[in-house]
Image (spheres, coloured by chain):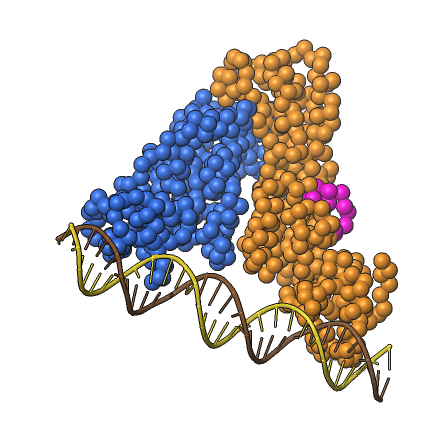
Chain colours: A blue, B orange, C brown, D yellow
Amino acid sequence: MQLDLSERERTILAVLIDHYVRTAEPVGSRVIATKYDLGVSPATVRNTLSDLEEKGLIEQPHTSAGRIPTETGYRLYVDKLLKSERLSASEREKIKRALSIDYSAIEDILEQTSRVLARLTSQLGVTITPKFDQAVLNKVDLVQLTDTRVMVIVAVRSGIVRTILIEVDSNIEVERLRQTADVLNEKLSGLSLGEIRRTIAERLRAEERGDPQVLKLFMEQHDHLLSESSGDELHTEGTMNILSQKEFQNPEKLREFLTLLEERHSLIDLLKIKTFANDITVTIGAEANIEGMKGCSAVTRSYQAGQIRGTVGVIGPTRMEYAKLMSLVDYTAKVLSEILSR
Amino acid sequence: MQLDLSERERTILAVLIDHYVRTAEPVGSRVIATKYDLGVSPATVRNTLSDLEEKGLIEQPHTSAGRIPTETGYRLYVDKLLKSERLSASEREKIKRALSIDYSAIEDILEQTSRVLARLTSQLGVTITPKFDQAVLNKVDLVQLTDTRVMVIVAVRSGIVRTILIEVDSNIEVERLRQTADVLNEKLSGLSLGEIRRTIAERLRAEERGDPQVLKLFMEQHDHLLSESSGDELHTEGTMNILSQKEFQNPEKLREFLTLLEERHSLIDLLKIKTFANDITVTIGAEANIEGMKGCSAVTRSYQAGQIRGTVGVIGPTRMEYAKLMSLVDYTAKVLSEILSR
DNA sequence: CGTTAGCACTCTAAGCAGTAGAGTGCCAAC
DNA sequence: GTTGGCACTCTACTGCTTAGAGTGCTAACG
């Protein structure tokens, strides 16, 4: 499809989208011609609209209604027509202040970030925690809980902790447990979890020191312990924001979306891919290839702290204020990166 | 209000509620008289219905409709009329199997429990983690993350771990940090977190050993670290189950309910109170004194493992199968207690 | 040749009347 | 105390009409 647009087509598409985003009503030729003074009559606008429809950028819900943008239309708008908005000083201030919580684990900061995004955008705020795989192991701790239960604590640089319990046959002496932990630390700390996962068998094979049973269990469980997919990595906030959006009045649509939210893994996949993007990314509707994301868009940006990367963003109906959301998410991601790499 | 019911009134109320729970439609006199053979005519039933209405147990949505139970009606039904249902062997089996996950932290087990409840009941499954306050401290760990950051790990018997970061002025030697941790363990382990919170100042006052700065920060942060209200104690699963319930077709109602879900603290409060109940508890509508719970009921039961107690249950519209849910929640709570106190 | 006014046409949303059906309350009779 | 009968009420559904919005097309205009 040829997408060379005339100057008029460009302005009219932009105006139409702007208006539709605000009103959620199909936009007719009269509104465009009168409310925004383009110096042309509704009839002329009609011709242009007809052209835009032929190009697949807008469509009519029914014959006697105005036009609404298609996904392709939004795409073009976001790529070419958008004029980026500057955040007001007060908004910047708000974001910065809200994210400056002291003494918090990274999980808390990310949860807070989702919340801030949700509040400022009235959309769904989402974050995922850093790719655990690339995180560097700081320390392994073994704690005897009961005679037969040992807790393994894996602490990663930047404040993430993961724990599991392993079940041992008999009580292990404190000194011996400490020695085992020392072995693990000596052999593994400073490595990324990914590396550890791939090479742990080799690294611990010839080890004579430490408790062999604990070491064996550690190796058996390492996948559960070190893998990135387990744990609470996705934070979502602002579900009710979504409810008030006009497009979710339809209970069928709403249900679909909430299912998406509850199943989590598709969302996690989506956000994880975005982790590798270095700039703000807009994913419109079907582009995400996720059933529940039909009719929805995501504005996302990766953040970074050392070797750790994750994604923050917002999700809402395709009819969203892209310019505003993009600058908001962009700025938030930057602030977050700063805070995390302090 | 006098609530002595005649035999007929009792059966008719029970039949009406049973039928309404299944159909979600107001129940008329004809249905009651014919579908359930009570040996009386619809006219007689009408008289009885009129009496029940006067007693506030049932009501009419509008003049020409059948009757539906009021909250008082449900209450009486649950207290007096319910015949308890036995779970089928296969359901018991399902629950037991689903909860027997090995090597899991308590958080995982509870999440799993909510999920099981949600699936088996088609309602919202909820759990809260044990009252942290009564949990007994097992070990405190201090881990140096960077020059100025120390992670405090508080491990409690039964597998809950909580961590925070504290920011110190300058690097602390490993040996000194270990010594500090030892002091904390010596003074505090074996005590309940509640005790610690109340008496920590006193217990550490005259302490000469350990790093004074870390000790000071620990004391300042102890509220954040030891308090029960922080952290992810509430697990909810099955949000979409709720969506398919007829009473939530009304978007206003739905919105209210999801707000409740997202705000969490009212739910936490509700479930926390139930922690002290030793038997299965049914909370109907306004009894919960929570805005968003209007039109909803909760069936809950506390579980127990050592000194630790928490609550599991389901939440759904007041029109629910109380008998079935009660036995299901009851059994689940028992299995959970067993598993946790292994 | 692009732009415009005019007009017939289409479709939706809203209001209105009429009807069927469900269910009640009451009364008189059993 | 129970029952059948009957008038009454209210909802939900149907079909009909109308107003309004918006389009597409055509012919005229600068």
Q: Is residue B257 left or right of residue B207?
A: left
The image quadrant of residue B13 is bottom right
Which contiguous range is marked in magenta?
Answer: B270-281
Q: Nearer the viewer, residue A180 or B51?
A: B51
The answer to whether residue B304 is seen in the rendering is no
Check if residue B271 falls in the magenta segment. yes
**Left or right placement of residue A256 versus residue B49 in this view:** left
Q: Position of residue A337 (x, y in %)?
A: 42, 27
Query: x and y percent of residue B251 in the render?
Result: 55, 54
Name the one closer to the observer, B285 or C20.
C20
Determine if the magenta segment contains residue A291: no
Residue B259 against residue D14 in the figure, above or below: above
* Residue A268, above or below B314: above
Quadrant of the image occupied by residue A300: top left
x 72%, y 50%: residue: B286
Q: Residue B278's x, y, as percent?
A: 77, 47
Q: Quadrant of residue B273?
A: top right
Residue A85 percent across, percent down from the top left:
36, 34
Question: In what quadrant of the picture does the C terminus of chain A appear?
Answer: top left
Question: Residue drawn 62% across and 30% down?
Answer: B155
